[in-house]
Amino acid sequence: MAATAPCASRARDIVMSHGWNATAYQVLNHGIRHWFDSTRCAVAGYVQRGSYLLAVGAPVCDPAILARVTQEFEEFARSVGCHVCYVCAGDRMRSLALGSRRHSIVTAGAQPVWMPSEWRAMVRSRASLRAQLRRALNRGVAIADMEPSQAAGHPELQYVLRKWLQCRGLPPMHFMAEPEVLRGAVDDRMVLAARWHGKVVAYLVASPVAARNGYLIEEIARLPNAPNGASELLIDAAMRRFAEQGNSYATMGLVALSRNVSRPNPFWLSGLMYVARAHANRFYNFRGIEQFRAKMQPRGWEEIYFISNEANFSPRALYAIGGAFSGISPIRAIGIAALKAGIRELRSLRRLAMGR
């Protein structure tokens, strides 16, 4: 059944008991619809795009009933004339779909993972990371916890987010990359703010991954003029808090187009990913994000998947996913990004021509 607003507390209870995918808490984000199974012991968060219900990761439930819940959710999708695609699913969902003639699996990328208790030792071993942390500390950047309820709607955080989004090559993302994460459920999130000269110049939001005793660092936003090292200082503070709380898992989320994957994709999708890796950095810094996370020496990388209840993963499913993330036609989003990139390059050429 489709959930109404009063069911949000039930969805949160399930997520805080059984949320295993790193994205599980995103089921509670603004704009995500809820479906509950017949026993109300499981919840799936989804959006509809065309003829697809795009699920946030996988249904959240006790792993012992995942197969039944998945079948029930797909029956619900059929009843409304839709396919299902599980977006950014992990190994549990892959294991369930593996070998199924009714499902297809493609690799979307990978996410780095850390054991928070090992963070301090890692920092001691990385001179370049220590230098970045010292750089921010020497400039007077200080990290402070914020009550999530206070952070939601906080004018300084909203200002940082607005300026951060203006610097992005792509239009604001939605669905599972929604920048307005503090418009959703906030009670269980961790919010850290970086202050410089008394003003917030960057902030971090981390969401619980309850069934793995850990957190997803879901968002880091910063002002363009924030001191170097402010982002690293936020991550360092978050990892230390995770360790102090006894958490055993932390991730910074999916790196799309990551090279830290081993499973091949269909030829057409591999070709698209090759082109994107070669040219998409003008719009979105995929390589830079992967390098930034890799320099912090994660314990490992977990492969992340798109899983569709179709015999073959189709371009239509990929188009639906792109539309959900962009909030508009993917073709229009690429056009806007290309226009912004062209304007930036023309400005750079003009400055060079003027000798600046």
Image: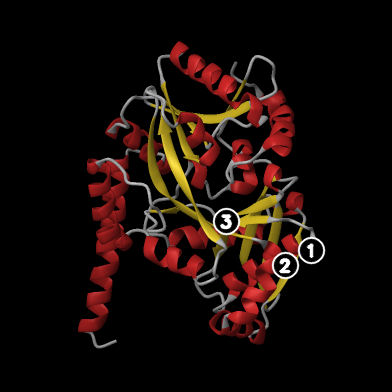
Residue depicted at 25% across the width and 60% down the height: 279
Query: Considering the numbered disc 2 on the image, is that residue within a helix, a strand or a loop?
Result: helix
At label 3, the amino acid type is Glu
At label 1, the amino acid type is Glu
Sequence-earlier tag: 3 or 2: 3
Report x, y in % for residue 223. Answer: 54, 68
Residue at which label 1 appears = 244
The reply to whether residue 285 is in sight is no
Q: Give the distance between the C-alpha atoms of the residues marked 1 and 2, in whole angstroms.
A: 6 Å
Residue at which label 2 appears = 240
Image marks 3 and 1: residues in contact by CB distance under 8 Å? no
Determine the residue located farthest toward the top in the rendered image.
79
Residue at which label 3 appears = 219
Residue depicted at 67% across the width and 78% down the height: 141
Placement of 199 over or under 330, stated as above or below: below
The reply to whether residue 5 is in sight is yes
Determine the residue located farthest toward the front in the rendered image.
99
Query: Considering the numbered disc 3 on the image, is that residue within a helix, a strand or a loop?
Result: strand
Residue depicted at 44% across the width and 63% down the height: 290
Report x, y in % for residue 181. Answer: 60, 47
